[in-house]
Amino acid sequence: MNTLFFSCLSMLWLILDCAQAQPCFHVTLPEGAKEFREPAKLSFVFPQRSPIPPGFSIFHNGENLALSGPACFLLELDIVRHVGLLGKFLGEPGGSGSLVELEGSDITLDLKGHALRSNRASTAIGAGVWGILQKPKNRHYSFKNGTIDVGGIGISMTGWQYSGESHNYRPGPHQVNMAIDWYGPNFREFGDTNILLENLTIKSGGLAAYLIGRNNIIRHCHIEVEGHEAIALFGANNQLIDNDIVIKRSRPRPSEPYQPPARLNIGSYYSEYAAIWIRDAPGLIIRGNKITIEGLFNAKEAILLINSPNVVIENNEVSGADRLYTALDEQSSAHARDNRKRFGKWPDSESH
C-alpha cells in the first residue's frame, strides 16, 4: 500500500453522542497505519469511491473489524473485501470469517450511507447472542443506514442450538434437557436480545438476517437474496415490518440435508425451505412487507412456521408462492388477514 492511499484515510477520533448517551467512534484509520486496536482491530479499508486493487483484502494476519460495546460506531468509509480468482488460488490472508465481529452489549453500528462488501466473507456482521433465558450473552444491537453486500449471510446473531448448525436444525433427544434449561419449555422463552435492523439494503447469497432471541425488529429494509431463503427469526415478540424482500432463486434449490442416523440421537434437519423461516416465535408480527419470489416456477410457500402459535401475518403483498404460509406442526398457527398477491388477495385465516 502506498503513501497516497493512506493519505486518503482520516484519523479515528472519539466524540460523545449526547443523544445516545454513549461513546461514539468514527471508524477510519490513522494516516499510514495498517491496524488500529482501540477500540477496533482493523487492517485495511477504502474510502468511498476509491479504486479497489484486484485481490485486495481488508484482513491482515487474520484480523477483522472487531467492535466492543457499549459504544456506537459511525462508518466513515466503505469496507470492501473482494478477492479475485488469483487471490483465491494463492490464498489471501485472513480466511473467510465475518467482516465485522461484535462483542459485548449496547452496540450501534451506523453505516452512514456506506457499505460492507465482500465476495468471500461467510458473514458480513456476526455475533453470538445465545438468547439464553434471562441472560443473553450479548444484546441491544442496532444496525442502520447503509448497504451490506456479501456472498454469504448478511447479519447473523445466533446461539447454542444453532451454533455450527443451520437454521433448519432440530436437536436430538439428548439435547432437549439443555434446551429447556437454556431457553425454557418448547424453546419459546428466549432472553431479550433487542436487535434492530433499520434502513438497510442487504444483498446476500445466503440468509440476509438470522436472528435469535426476543424483541428483535427488522424494518424499512430492502433485501435481495440470490438463494431461496431470506430471513430466519427465532423467538417471541419479533417483528418484520415494512420491508421489501426479493428472493431471486438464482442458485440451485437447497439439497436434501444429510440426516444423521436416528440411533445417534444427535438431531436432524427440516427439509422444507421458504423465504421467511419463523421458529419458536409465539406472537411474531409480519406486517406491511412486499415479498417477491422470482423464478421459473412458484415456490411452495412464502413463510414457514415451526413451534410458533398466534403469528400475525397482515397487510403484506406476497407474490411467487403457491401458499402464503405453512405450519409444520400442530403448535403453530397464524392470524392472516388483508394480504395481497399479484392478482387478487390471499385468503384470511385464523387457523393452521
Image: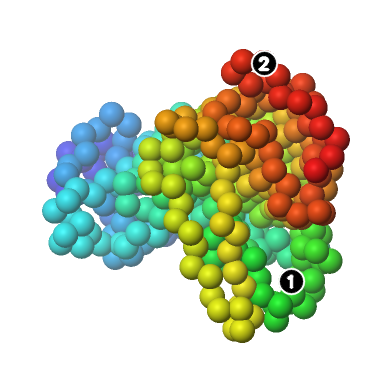
Q: Residue at x 42, y 31 (%)?
A: 296
Rendered image: mark on residue 58: none
> Which quadrant: the C terminus?
top right
Instruction: Pick out the residue farthest to the top.
Output: 343
Residue 321 lies, in percent from the top left, at 58, 32
Can you say whether 72 is above or below 307 in the image?
Answer: above
Side of 253 relative to 170 (left or right)? left
Label 2: few (<14), some or many (≥20) within 10 Å?
few
Q: Of residues 37 and 216, which is closer to you in this image?
A: 216
Splitting the image into 4 quarters, where does residue 205 fall? top left
Residue 320 x/y as whole percent: 54, 28
Residue at 76 percent of width and 54 percent of height? 329
Q: How many marks?
A: 2
Q: Is residue 146 above or below residue 45?
A: above
Kindly state the secondary structure of the residue where label 1 is placed. helix
Q: Quadrant of residue 287?
A: top right
Name the outermost residue toward the bottom.
263
Is residue 257 in sight in this rendering?
yes
Image coordinates of residue 101 in percent, x first then y, are 49, 56
Residue that carries the numbered disc 2 in the rendered image: 344
* Closer to the camera in the image, 269 or 80: 269
Q: CA distance from mark 2 to mark 1?
A: 43 Å
Q: Using residue 240 as the reference point, say whether residue 300 is left or right of it.
A: left
- Residue 240 visible in the shown view: no
Q: Position of residue 125 (x, y in %)?
A: 49, 50
Q: Amino acid at mark 1?
A: Ala
Tag 1 residue: 179
